[in-house]
Amino acid sequence: MSIAIYPGSFDPVTYGHLDVIRRASLITDRLIVGVLNNPSKNPLFTVEERVELLKQAVSGIENVEIRSFSGLTVDFARLCGANVIVRGLRAVTDFEYELMLSQTNRKLCPDVDTIFLTTSLQYAYLSSSVVKEVAMYNGNISEFVPEFVEKQIKDKMSQRGE
Ligand code: ADP
């Protein structure tokens, strides 16, 4: 059985992430999305909130589960019994960082390999940071994230007075 993890911040989940999740779920038996607990990055949503949003967003996909993790991605992969790490590639700007990350991970854990899914063209520009930036200035984010995520972003930003 092939088990893969898809690690990231997902702050919050976007249609770009969901496209990678859907496509990765078709080529693995089990896909575990790992939400990185990274308080030092001052995320908009807590790790528990990010997990909940993702759970709701992938509820129709049977072989996908959502977990949180802290520490090294390769340790999370081992914990999950996974031998594949899935990452998304949008543009050349992602490439250098992703290459370095995948080579480091392979050095740390030679049994785990990274595979890259290139973005679907309609999401090539999309990142969680862009979504937050547009939302902060009251722009329309309905094409970037599902409706319930949009609502949570707006609620969170108004709570924080942004
Ligand atoms: P970001 O804040 O850039 O969305 P994440 O850590 O949440 O970053 O992303 C997790 C993974 O998903 C990374 O491999 C990233 O390259 C990938 N990803 C993010 N957005 C997209 C997208 N629009 N298309 C393809 N892959 C994406």
Image (cartoon, rainbow, N blue to C red):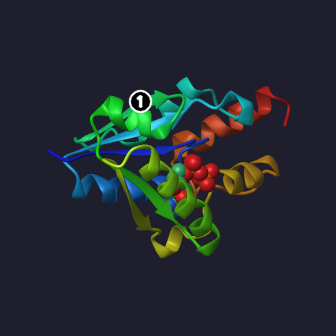
Residue at image point 47% right, 44% down: 7
Residue at image point 33% right, 55% down: 22
Whether 154 is drawn above or below 84: the answer is above
Residue at image point 72% right, 48% down: 132
Residue 15 visible, this angle: no
Counting from the top left corner in percent of width and height, residue 149 is at: 56, 41
* Residue type, label 1: Arg
Counting from the top left corner in percent of width and height, residue 131 is at: 67, 53
Q: Quadrant of residue 159?
A: top right
Residue 94 visible, this angle: yes
Q: Quadrant of ligand 1?
A: bottom right
Quadrant into which the C terminus falls: top right
Whether 131 is drawn above or below 33: the answer is below
Relative to 116, 62 lies left or right? left
Of residues 52 and 33, the one drawn nearer to the viewer in this rendering:
33
Quadrant into which the N terminus falls: top left
Relative to 75, 148 lies left or right? right
Counting from the top left corner in percent of width and height, residue 75 is at: 42, 33
* Residue at which label 1 appears: 67
Secondary structure under tag 1 reads strand
Relative to 107, 150 lies left or right? right
